[in-house]
Every structure is written in structure tokens, then in C-alpha cells.
Amino acid sequence: MTLKMENPFTTKMQLKNDGELLKILKSSTSFDYKAVLAAFYELEKRGLPLTEFVSLKLELEEKFLRENTNMSNTETSSYSKVIIFASSFLLLPIIGAVLLSLNLFDRSKKMGILVVLLFGILYTLLSLLVLNLFTYPFWLVLLLNGFGGGMLSEFFWNKFMRDNK
């Protein structure tokens, strides 16, 4: 089963004796649920009857699967740095800001959403103001959009999308 292989507590539980492992199962609320699962799997591997703990095992496996499913959905729904830069460069930086904000929304980073959207709005307005002064030369549009896209895809991405929680 994949749950047994992905558990960081598996090697620690292999070193414990049966009594210590049973104690972990009996006081499961005092331990990380992954540690309890690893203890259960180790006792199961040793051939001990664990019928009284089957419902606990199922509950913890469900929790483990639910958390891992949520993480994989978040990873697959994210817009890449390239998409954010390209949409900012070819359209407007506010478009890239919205895409980056959607990534941050998936990761529940509310402060990042506010900062990125505020940057996108203010930068787009400032760019339009500058462009009105120079009657919209195409090279300046690309330069301003490229700089805004670079800020979003490098600075704000590194600040809010890194997994340093």
C-alpha cells in the first residue's frame, strides 16, 4: 500500500517494540496521525491481531489520502511562471496578476492575493498614464508590460509561491 511507503515515521516505528507501538495506538490523540499509522502498519507487519484498531486505521488513512489529494490538486491547477509572464507581456500586467492571485488563492495565501492584485492594478494604471504621455509607442508598451510581467513572475512568485510557509 502506498501509504506505508510515503510515511516518514515508518523507519522510527521499526525500531520500537510491540508494547511501545501498542501504547502509541492506544493514545493515538497524543501523536501525529502519520506516526500512529506507521505504528499500526509495523504491528500489522509483525502479525499481531489489531481488530480493535481497524476503525482508527481507516479514519487515519482517509485523512492521509484527503490531504495528499488536496495537495496534488493544488499543484496541477497552478499557472506557471511562463504563463504569468507571457500573459502580462502580451496582454496586460493585470492579467498576470489575476493568474498569480488564482495560484495564491489555491494555496490560501490571502495577504499575497491582496498585494499582487494591488500591484497589478496600480502598475497597469501607471503604465497607461506613462503611455498617454508618449502616444502609445509599441516598444514602450512591450517594455512596460515585460517589466510588469517580470515583477510578477520573478519577484512576487518567489515571495509568495515558494513553499516556505
Image (cartoon, helix red, strand yellow):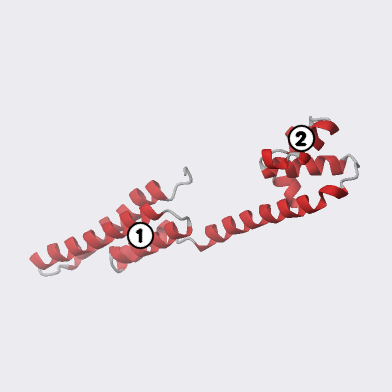
Determine whether the residue tagged by mark 1 lies in a helix, strand or loop.
helix
Rendered image: mark on residue 85: 1
Depth order, front residue of 3/142: 3
Q: Is residue 34 left or right of residue 158?
A: right
Residue at 40 percent of width and 49 percent of height? 160
Task: Give the percent coordinates (x, y) of residue 6.
Answer: 70, 46
Q: Are there few (<14), some (14-19), or many (20+) residues within 10 Å of tag 2?
A: many
Position above or below: 22 against 105 = above
Q: Quadrant of residue 85?
A: bottom left
Depth order, front residue of 43/24: 24
Q: Earlier in the sequence, mark 2 or mark 1?
A: 2
Question: Does residue 31 show up?
Answer: no
Query: What amino acid does circle 2 point to?
Result: Met
Q: Quadrant of residue 42?
A: top right
Position above or below: 107 against 25 = below
Residue at 33 percent of width and 66 percent of height? 95
Determine whether the residue tagged by mark 2 lies in a helix, strand or loop.
helix
Report the Cα–Cα distance between label 2 and label 1: 47 Å
Q: Are there few (<14), some (14-19), or many (20+) residues within 10 Å of tag 1?
A: many
Depth order, front residue of 44/55: 55
The residue under label 2 is 13
Task: Give the percent coordinates (x, y) of residue 91.
Answer: 30, 69
Depth order, front residue of 142/14: 14
2 vs 1, front mark: 2
Task: Give the percent coordinates (x, y) of residue 146.
Answer: 28, 59
Rendered image: mark on residue 61: none
